[in-house]
Image (cartoon, helix red, strand yellow):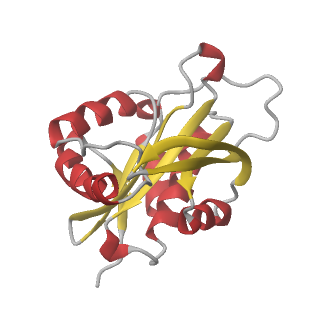
Amino acid sequence: MSAAHLRAATIEDAAAVAAIYATYVATTAISFETEPPDAATMAQRMGKVLALHPWLVATIDDEVVGYAYASPHRDRAAYRWSVDVAAYLDARFHRRGIAKRLYEALCTLLKMQHIVNAFGIISLPNAASAALHESCGFVRCATETRVGYKFDAWHDVGMWQKVLQTDASAPVEPAPFMSLPAEAVARVLNG
């Protein structure tokens, strides 16, 4: 099998991304959505995110097998240096290091954008996701108890934080993802 290749997502990836995500929505409490979004809805979400933050896909032999993205942590302006991050893989490609590569590239790009904090929000229990975040330098910082109800059960949500800028006493204004130099982004994705 070929190695995974990372690239910035495009709206044309929406159907493949929606297909990967649909399994998580339909069969797990990993996502608190109850109806899988269709390709058109996913394209809208991707377009909204890509205006400011990275959305990456991993491909093998031109097939999208996973993705990771960042989105605003909260809506208020003072939160603009913080993002939430997420990664999802086609189940056939779990435990091959692809999610870790996606997260490492995503965090490097976020750092280039001057983002200070990345947060992974994990429905619990989810040992695999917790291990992924911790292997990428995230530290558990909070737990919300009985916050989501899905599949006839209450679920806790844990929050993992990674500080991307250690000297952020006077943070630099975040740069939109699309404003990063293409050569620098390519180096991160091909690294």
Viewer-closest of 159 and 162: 159
- The image shows residue 174 at horizontal and vertical percentages of 59, 26
- The image shows residue 103 at horizontal and vertical percentages of 53, 56
Q: Can you tell which quarter of the image residue 88 is in?
A: bottom left
Viewer-closest of 128 and 63: 128
Seen in the picture, residue 152 relative to 78 is either above or below; the reply is below
**Relative to residue 58, is residue 86 drawn left or right?**
right
Viewer-closest of 108 and 83: 83
What residue is drawn where x is 44% and y is 54%?
30
What residue is drawn where x is 41% and y is 74%?
94
- The image shows residue 57 at horizontal and vertical percentages of 34, 55
Is any part of residue 113 visible from this angle? no
Farthest residue to the bottom: give it.
Answer: 1
What residue is drawn where x is 57% and y is 35%?
83
Seen in the picture, residue 108 relative to 97 is either above or below; the reply is above
- The image shows residue 151 at horizontal and vertical percentages of 38, 53
Seen in the picture, residue 134 relative to 83 is either above or below; the reply is below
How many marks can you see? Answer: 0
Is any part of residue 63 visible from this angle? yes
Farthest residue to the front: give it.
Answer: 152
What residue is drawn where x is 61% and y is 59%?
133
Seen in the picture, residue 26 relative to 55 is either above or below; the reply is below
Q: Can you tell which quarter of the image residue 1 is in?
A: bottom left
